[in-house]
């Protein structure tokens, strides 16, 4: 027998309390983004696959559902990440000369969950800043990320910073075998030194030694000093370390740490990258970084940096909001005119003041507590008053 109520694996409904918590976080975060000058956009759920996935690396391509468009015959992709879409909006539709700040919130779909407990339908919310190439933009979005987590009452316990430019500098000019850069990336991300030694055995000594050193460079700001000593003195590496040191100095009130082997989104990012962690979460709750090349796909390369997180995952970690109980009101049509009009006016007055008022549809006595009611609207001496709900 087919259980028609079952959902696909790692796809889930949000029940009232969970949905209310997600919506509470969404409203607070988007309002905070808007207060910082980030304008809301809402890209579509699907686009042509060649436009959506071309510059985002193999990982995003594998995570994306694809289908054939019956109108055009072309392959469409259901979005697995909203950031490329926002980059398209900035580069092609808005086409502004100066700094553009955009924010968004919407569902994305993944062919496989990103971790054991992850949903295949994250609710992605994020903020992106376009048009400023210097470190001030990274500074702004990291601080905005920290503020967003504080609004969720989940202040970051750690924000790891890295820089993709260091890896790119170490491998620049090398004729790597097909797929080797991805293998190096995975070994660095896992800090798998034995595998890294195997993969780098045929590389020039400078690149090999630098890559083998990266997994050891994690911790406090002292990591940056150590990296300046033990990594090659290439201009790109010196510039990357200078950017990270400046962020360390300017954001010293945040719990920053540094991990120079953290190359999350290597194909996607181009500079500073970061990952935020909260207590009780073994995985990062938010990811971000600089991605200066994606806009070129849409005809206009723009400096860009931003972050995103999954509101579903964040809601599971945050303390649920205590919803006020609803007021049960008599069904207005049961009262004679003009009492029915007076009752309706009182109901609207209560709703305008912020109360939840539920009209008692006939025939459901004894079931209103499960609908959230804890009080009732009662007429006493020609006045409508609110009393505790009396229900068996």
Image: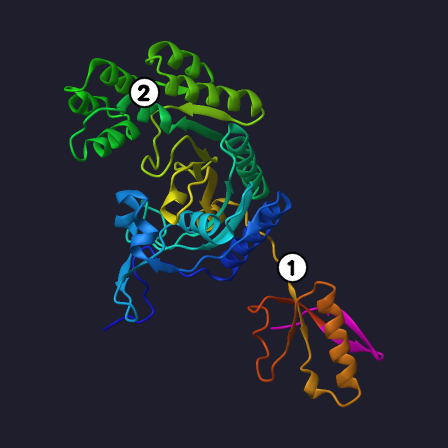
The residue at 30%/56% (across/down) is: 49
Main SS, magenta region, reads strand
Residue annotated with mark 1: 324
**Which residue, as the protein is rendered here, is positioned at the far top?**
229
Please tell me in which quadrant of the rendered image residue 198 appears. top left
Q: Position of residue 184 (x, y in %)?
A: 23, 29
Residue 74 falls left or right of residue 387? left
Neighbours of disc 1 within 10 Å: few (<14), some (14-19), many (20+): few
Pick whichever of labels 2 and 1 is earlier in the sequence. 2
Was residue 380 drawn as part of the magenta stretch in this picture?
Answer: yes
Task: Assign the C terminus to one quadrant of the image.
Answer: bottom right
Residue 24 falls left or right of residue 166? right
Q: Position of residue 302 (x, y in %)?
A: 45, 40
Residue annotated with mark 2: 214
Task: Assign the N terminus to one quadrant of the image.
Answer: bottom left
Residue 187 seen by the camera: yes
Which secondary structure, mark 1? loop
Please tell me in which quadrant of the rendered image residue 56 appears. top left
Which secondary structure, mark 2? helix
Please tell me in which quadrant of the rendered image residue 330 appears. bottom right
Q: Which mark is residue 385?
A: none
The residue at 69%/87% (across/down) is: 334
Q: Which residues are magenta?
A: 377-392
As displayed, is residue 313 above or below residue 48? above
Measured in 3D between alpha carbons, the distance from the residue under mark 2 to the one under mark 1, in whole angstroms, is 52 Å
């Amino acid at each position: 027998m087919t259980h028609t109520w079952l959902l696909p694996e790692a796809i889930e409904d949000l029940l009232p309390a969970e949905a209310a918590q997600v919506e509470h976080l969404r409203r607070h975060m988007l309002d905070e983004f808007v207060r910082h000058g980030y304008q809301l956009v809402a890209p579509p759920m699907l686009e042509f696959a060649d436009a959506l996935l071309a510059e985002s690396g193999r990982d995003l391509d594998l995570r994306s559902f694809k289908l054939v468009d019956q109108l055009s015959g072309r392959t469409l992709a259901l979005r697995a990440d909203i950031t490329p879409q926002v980059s398209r909006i900035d580069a092609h539709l808005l086409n502004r000369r100066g700094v553009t700040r955009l924010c968004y919130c919407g569902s994305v779909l993944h062919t496989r969950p990103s971790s054991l407990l992850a949903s295949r339908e994250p609710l992605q919310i994020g903020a992106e800043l376009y048009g400023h190439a210097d470190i001030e933009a990274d500074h702004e979005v990291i601080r905005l990320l920290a503020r967003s987590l504080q609004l969720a009452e989940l202040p970051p316990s750690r924000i790891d910073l890295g820089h993709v430019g260091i890896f790119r500098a170490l491998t620049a000019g090398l004729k790597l075998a097909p797929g080797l850069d991805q293998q190096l990336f995975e070994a660095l991300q896992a800090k798998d030194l034995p595998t890294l030694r195997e993969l780098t055995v045929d590389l020039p000594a400078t690149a090999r030694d630098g890559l083998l050193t990266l997994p050891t460079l994690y911790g406090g700001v002292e990591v940056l000093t150590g990296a300046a000593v033990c990594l090659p003195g290439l201009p790109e590496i010196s510039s990357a370390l200078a950017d990270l040191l400046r962020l360390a100095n300017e954001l010293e009130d945040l719990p920053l740490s540094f991990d120079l082997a953290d190359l999350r989104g290597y194909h996607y990012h181009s500079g500073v990258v970061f990952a935020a962690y909260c207590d009780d979460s073994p995985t990062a709750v938010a990811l971000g970084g600089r991605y200066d090349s994606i806009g070129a796909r849409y005809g206009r390369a723009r400096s860009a940096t931003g972050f995103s997180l999954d509101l579903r995952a964040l809601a599971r970690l945050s303390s649920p909001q205590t919803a006020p109980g609803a007021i049960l009101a008599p069904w207005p049509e049961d009262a004679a005119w003009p009492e029915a009009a007076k009752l309706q006016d009182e109901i609207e007055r209560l709703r305008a003041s912020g109360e939840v008022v539920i009209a008692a549809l006939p025939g459901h006595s004894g079931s209103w507590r499960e609908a959230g009611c804890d009080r009732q609207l009662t007429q006493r001496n020609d006045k409508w008053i609110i009393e505790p709900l009396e229900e068996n």
